[in-house]
Image: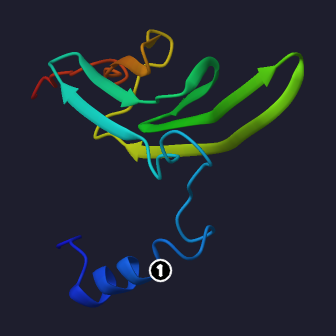
Amino acid sequence: MSTLPTPRQSLFDDLFAGLAPSYVVRPLHGDPLPQQIRLDVREDAENYIVQAELPGASRDDIHVSVDGSLLSITAELKQFDQQTRNERVLRSERYYGSVSRSLRLPVDIDDTRAVARFDNGVLALTLPKKSPAGGERKLRID
């Protein structure tokens, strides 16, 4: 299934991109608010390793939750720019918004051993796979 825009969608996007501020979220300065959190997901024998780009977010404004195999990341993003001269504000531009992303992993996550780190706008998650209850058991055949 292709997610590429059709020529009609692309023409529509190009036509309205600069006209309607609610159509394309653009702050008054800086980079536009990301429409979606970009993720890299890798897997090894014991863990899922997730890296999420969250530029402009602070550690306290990021929320990660795990429910079985469902991973959800939400972040509040704030852009603030203020210029002053002699204590009088000449210009102040602010932008606040939020982004979120959820994905279902193939195996449940052991949330008691999960680790999250945030550095330079990148959230790094190490999510251990939950082993099946009781592990594999061989049956004796009578």
Return the residue found at the far front: 86
Q: Out of 87 and 67, give the one closest to the viewer.
A: 87
Residue ID at (39%, 21%): 122
| Horizontal arrangement in the rendering, residue 62 relative to residue 68 (left or right) | right
Q: Out of 3 and 18, give the one closest to the viewer.
A: 18
Residue ID at (39%, 30%): 53
Dividing the picture into quadrants, the one containing residue 10 is: bottom left
Quadrant that contains the C terminus: top left
Q: Position of residue 30 (x, y in %)?
A: 52, 39
Return the residue found at the far left: 141
Dividing the picture into quadrants, the one containing residue 134 is: top left
Q: Out of 83 and 86, give the one closest to the viewer.
A: 86
Return the residue found at the far right: 88
| Horizontal arrangement in the rendering, residue 138 relative to residue 131 (left or right) | left
Q: Position of residue 65 (x, y in %)?
A: 56, 30
- Is any part of residue 116 visible from this angle? no
Q: Is the residue 8 above or below the residue 115 in the image? A: below
Q: Is the residue 135 above or below the residue 18 in the image? A: above
Using a 10 Å C-alpha cutoff, classify the residue at mark 1 as few (fewer than 14 neighbours), some (14 to 19) or many (20 or more): few
Q: Position of residue 126 (x, y in %)?
A: 35, 15
- Is any part of residue 55 visible from this angle? yes
Q: Which residue is mark 1?
A: 16
Q: Position of residue 87 (x, y in %)?
A: 89, 17
